[in-house]
């Protein structure tokens, strides 16, 4: 094969012929070297593109991982803050329940004392005994919500029991107060009624007259005891009565203790049931040392004997 090359130099045309060997080399270059070079170039650029594509997901994955780690850390911080807040809430709940329990125990002890109950049977300072056969649960895990719900129910129950105990204490206190205010008992120890309530012959005139109380004899200086709690409204001399003490017991009841030799209380004093308020004497219109006792209801005298104890004290 002969290849003729034509060049134009200085306006003249020149021709050159390649030898068969040169032609073979040139063919080899065209058929082998050039495709190989192109292949290598294509492979190089393809490798670069593949590396670029491989590097890009790695960068994206690292960024996503960093974002996820930041999110996880934020979640952990939120959970820690929530746990701390939950612990604070539980602490407050437990503190309130402890205070309620202490108040309930104190109320229970006072009620037991007021009712005269056996302290060994109603010892509120000791926890009640508990027991029972264990039963398997479907879910042994105790959740925070379950704990809070149980505490809430227990707190409500404690408040209700405390209200009930307070109401019961108030009722018992009112009952005791009413019993203390109710004038009933025996004013002079070891004595008897010498003159009853109602019509009798007057000891001075001998005429029939109405006796508005009862007479109870006694030694001079013997103590006179109040039939009930109340407030002293009179503590001085009164015409016909001599030295007299008058006590207002409330609910319309008043008692009068006359002919005393000595008065032991003053007007405005609060007296308790059985308290010594005077001493037996014979002052006023009297034939000898004794107590003239009157019981008034809404300002009118009534028979006190109905309220005197049959067993003298």
Image (tube, grey):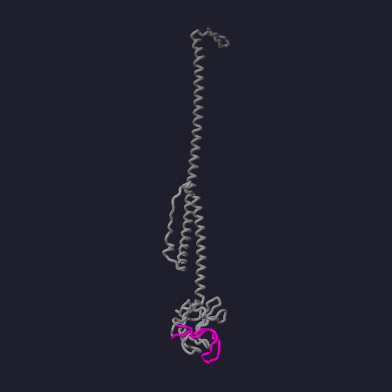
Q: Is residue 93 above or below residue 191?
A: above
Of residues 196 and 115, the one nearer the viewer is 196
Q: Is residue 105 above or below residue 27?
A: below
Residue at left 57%, top 81%?
300
Q: 64 or 103, which lies in front? A: 103
Residue 270 drawn in magenta: no
Residue extent of the magenta highlight: 191-220
Report the quarter where the C terminus lies: bottom left
Say whether residue 69 is visible: yes
Q: Where 145 falls versus 286 (above or below)?
A: above
Residue 91: x percent and y percent?
47, 55
Residue 198 falls within the magenta-colored stretch: yes
Q: Specify the farthest residue to the bottom.
A: 205
**Chief secondary structure of the magenta portion:** loop
The structure residue drawn at horizontal position 49% and vertical position 24%, both measured from the top left corner, is 44
Horizontal and vertical percent position of residue 145: 50, 50
Residue depicted at x 47% and y 66%: 111
Q: Position of residue 233 (x, y in %)?
A: 52, 80
Front residue (pair 279, 290): 290
């Amino acid at each position: 094969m002969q290849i003729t090359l034509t060049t134009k130099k200085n306006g003249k045309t020149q021709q050159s012929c390649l030898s068969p060997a040169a032609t073979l080399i040139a063919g080899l270059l065209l058929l082998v070297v050039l495709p190989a070079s192109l292949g290598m170039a294509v492979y190089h650029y393809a490798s670069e593109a593949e590396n670029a594509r491989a590097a890009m997901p790695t960068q994206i994955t690292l960024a996503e991982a960093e974002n996820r780690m930041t999110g996880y850390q934020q979640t952990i911080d939120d959970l820690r803050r929530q746990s701390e807040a939950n612990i604070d809430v539980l602490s407050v709940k437990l503190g309130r329940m402890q205070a309620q329990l202490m108040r309930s125990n104190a109320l229970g002890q006072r009620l037991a004392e007021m009712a005269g109950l056996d302290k060994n049977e109603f010892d509120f300072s000791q926890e009640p005994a508990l027991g029972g056969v264990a039963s398997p649960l479907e879910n042994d895990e105790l959740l925070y919500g379950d704990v809070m719900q149980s505490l809430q129910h227990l707190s409500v129950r404690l408040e209700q029991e405390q209200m009930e105990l307070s109401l019961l204490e108030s009722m018992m206190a009112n009952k005791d107060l009413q019993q203390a205010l109710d004038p009933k008992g025996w004013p002079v120890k070891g004595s008897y009624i010498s003159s009853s309530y109602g019509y009798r012959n007057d000891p001075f005139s001998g005429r029939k007259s109405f006796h508005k109380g009862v007479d109870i004899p006694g030694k001079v200086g013997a103590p006179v005891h109040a039939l009930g709690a109340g407030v002293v409204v009179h503590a001085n001399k009164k015409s016909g009565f001599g030295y007299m003490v008058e006590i207002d017991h409330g609910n319309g009841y008043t008692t009068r203790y006359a002919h005393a030799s000595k008065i032991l209380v003053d007007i405005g004093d609060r007296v308790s049931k059985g308290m010594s308020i005077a001493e037996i004497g014979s002052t006023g219109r009297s034939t000898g040392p004794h107590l003239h006792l009157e019981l008034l209801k809404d300002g009118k005298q009534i028979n006190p004997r109905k309220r005197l104890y049959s067993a003298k004290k």
